[in-house]
Amino acid sequence: MSVILGIDIGGSGIKGAPVDTRTGQLVGERRRIPTPEGAAPEDVKKVVAELVTHFGLPGAVGVTFPGIVQRGHTLSAANVHPDWVGLDADALFSEATGHDVHLINDADAAGLAEARFGAGRGVQGTVMVLTFGTGIGSALIHDGVLIPNTELGHLWLRDKHAESWASDRARELDDLNWKQWSKRVSSYLQHLELLFSPDLFIIGGGVSKKAEKWQEHLKVGRGRVVPATLLNEAGIIGAAMMAAHDATPAGETTTSPEPARPTPPRKTPARKTPARKKA
């Protein structure tokens, strides 16, 4: 089945929509429910179950989470309730919804979607997707393969915690204009460039809708910087992609959550020259 429900858990809202994972298109109207105050697991579980019931799709469900996700367990909770740490969230949501739920870090989901269907489509090499909002999310993708849970928003730039200093929330709290904010982000991107040398930076999150205000002010060394193109749909799409991939039985094929790698040309074996007979 190519149509999968994707759900994106955000700081202010939890959004869901059915996604055609072959094309990356939403095939139904997106529904948004405010995130419960405090974002405790039991409260968030009820909202996810409400969204699953609303859409009524069969099969697997993909859900994003704003923190580290390993084998369905949530291992950090920087901007949500601390009860998420160490929780088997796949089991929590699967039991609440009656569906097979697959969890993925929210920035990783956005990165997968942008790499396959958005601003990174067809780009080889290293792509870094950064989402600027309440914090800074990151996704690192090399030749279409995701390296999960990078959490690069928590790097330190000397005495500055990156997302506390350069997120969109920091811009608002410090009353920065776009040029001032872009100077901070440029310092952050240049630091990431020294560490990873990405070929392309994709800037997502809420700021991607206002690219004309900051794009000309961002300065990096060797790479390129472009705004994300999938905007608020990226997390939903990436969650559905991962669920479709994880739910595929062994021996079957489905749309991969990452872009397919180019197939190298086949080498033709060298023909052996027959030995000459002695006279």
Image (cartoon, helix red, strand yellow):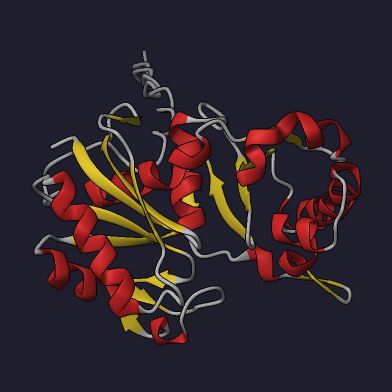
> Image point 23% across, 54% down: which residue?
51
> Image point 74% across, 48% down: which residue?
197
Q: How many marks?
A: 0
Q: Nearer the viewer, residue 269 or 147?
A: 147
From the viewer's perspective, tell me whether residue 210 is left or right of residue 242: right
Compared to residue 105, the image places residue 25 above or below, namely: above
From the viewer's perspective, tell me whether residue 135 is left or right of residue 53: right
Name the spot of residue 88 as percent of width and height, x first.
28, 79
From the viewer's perspective, tell me whether residue 17 is left or right of residue 212: left
> Image point 38% across, 85% down: which residue?
86
Name the spot of residue 142 as percent of width and height, x first.
55, 45
Query: Is residue 240 visible to us here?
Result: yes
**Quadrant of the rendered structure where residue 1 is?**
top left
Query: Is residue 221 visible to us here?
Result: no
> Image point 85% across, 50% down: which residue?
181
**Quadrant of the rendered structure where residue 87 is?**
bottom left
